Image (spheres, rainbow, N blue to C red):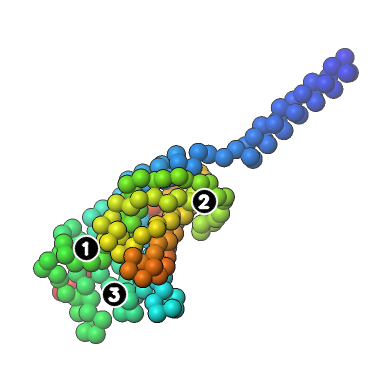
């Protein structure tokens, strides 16, 4: 009886250990991860984000864009620097407002669609994550993004963004997808300039996803 009890304990221990090891070494399908991560972020009604873009210019690495933004439905607000100039913009529906960096007065654009196209990635960061085909997706490890555990996936997709396609080529994406709910938290995009083959890197981070954010038109 004692031997049977001992063997039973050993068997239970092996099963538990196998389960723990299985959970530790289990890895998700990277294509499913990326698909779900992109779908979840695109479906989000609100979020805050940061966007930083580096580009090699005349042999030097320069920060072209560094902004903070927030989005709630069709409303967006951004603040930061764009090509060395201060920028503060608010988009409310079809209207776009820009603060003059010298007079500090708000200006309403009469041709909002054209303005939005110029600031496409800044006002709509999800535009940089529209992909025609994912290509081969590789799971390259794990990392933490603002304290959240995330899977790290790498891919070389074909993009569905005309502005990006005109100026850039050889795209490589690194996506950080939260392990708990498969939400995309961070994206790093690397590419080369079509004319000069100079490298470009864009980093996007998202937080406060799904939270209520108040964005109102400025007083003019």
Give the Cα separation between the discs numbered 3 and 1.
16 Å
In x, y percent, where is residue 104? 23, 81
Q: Quadrant of the C terminus?
A: bottom left
* In this picture, residue 116 sits left or right of residue 169: left
Name the image quarter holding residue 106: bottom left
Q: Are marks 2 and 1 in contact (CB under 8 Å)?
A: no
Residue at 20%, 61% in the rendered image: 92
Q: Nearer the viewer, mark 3 or mark 1?
A: 1
Residue 202 can be seen in this image = no
Residue at 42%, 68% in the rendered image: 199
Q: Nearer the viewer, mark 2 or mark 3?
A: 2
Q: Secondary structure at mark 1?
A: helix
Q: Is residue 55 above or below residue 172?
A: below
Give the Cα separation between the discs numbered 2 and 1.
30 Å
Q: Secondary structure at mark 3?
A: strand
* In this picture, residue 19 sits left or right of residue 146: right
Q: Which residue is mark 3?
A: 87
Q: Are marks 2 and 3 in contact (CB under 8 Å)?
A: no
Give the Cα separation between the discs numbered 2 and 3.
32 Å
Q: Which mark is residue 117?
A: 1
Q: Are marks 3 and 1 in contact (CB under 8 Å)?
A: no
Q: Residues within 10 Å of mark 2 (few under 14, many from 20)?
A: many
Q: Is residue 68 above or below residue 129?
A: below
Q: Which mark is residue 152?
A: 2
Name the image quarter holding residue 217: bottom left
Extreme residue in the bottom direction: 102
Residue 193 can be seen in this image = yes
Residue at 83%, 21% in the rendered image: 7
């Amino acid at each position: 009886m004692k031997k049977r009890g001992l063997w039973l304990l050993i068997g239970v221990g092996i099963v538990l250990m196998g389960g723990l090891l299985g959970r530790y070494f289990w890895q998700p399908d990277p294509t499913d991860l990326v698909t779900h991560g992109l779908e979840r972020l695109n479906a989000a009604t609100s979020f805050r984000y940061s966007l930083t873009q580096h580009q090699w210019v005349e042999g030097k690495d320069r920060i072209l864009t560094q902004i903070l933004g927030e989005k709630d439905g069709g409303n967006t607000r951004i603040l930061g620097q764009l090509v060395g100039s201060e920028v503060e913009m608010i988009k409310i529906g079809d209207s776009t407002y820009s603060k003059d960096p010298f007079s500090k007065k708000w200006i309403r654009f009469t041709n909002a669609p054209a303005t939005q196209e110029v600031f496409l990635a800044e006002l709509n960061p999800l535009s940089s994550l529209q992909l025609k085909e994912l290509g081969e997706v590789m799971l390259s490890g794990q990392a933490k993004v603002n304290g959240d555990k995330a899977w790290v996936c790498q891919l070389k997709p074909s993009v569905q963004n005309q502005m990006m396609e005109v100026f850039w080529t050889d795209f490589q994406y690194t996506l950080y997808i939260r392990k708990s709910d498969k939400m995309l938290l961070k994206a790093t995009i690397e590419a080369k300039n079509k004319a000069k083959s100079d490298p470009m890197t864009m980093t996007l981070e998202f937080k406060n996803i799904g939270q209520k954010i108040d964005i109102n038109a400025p007083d003019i």
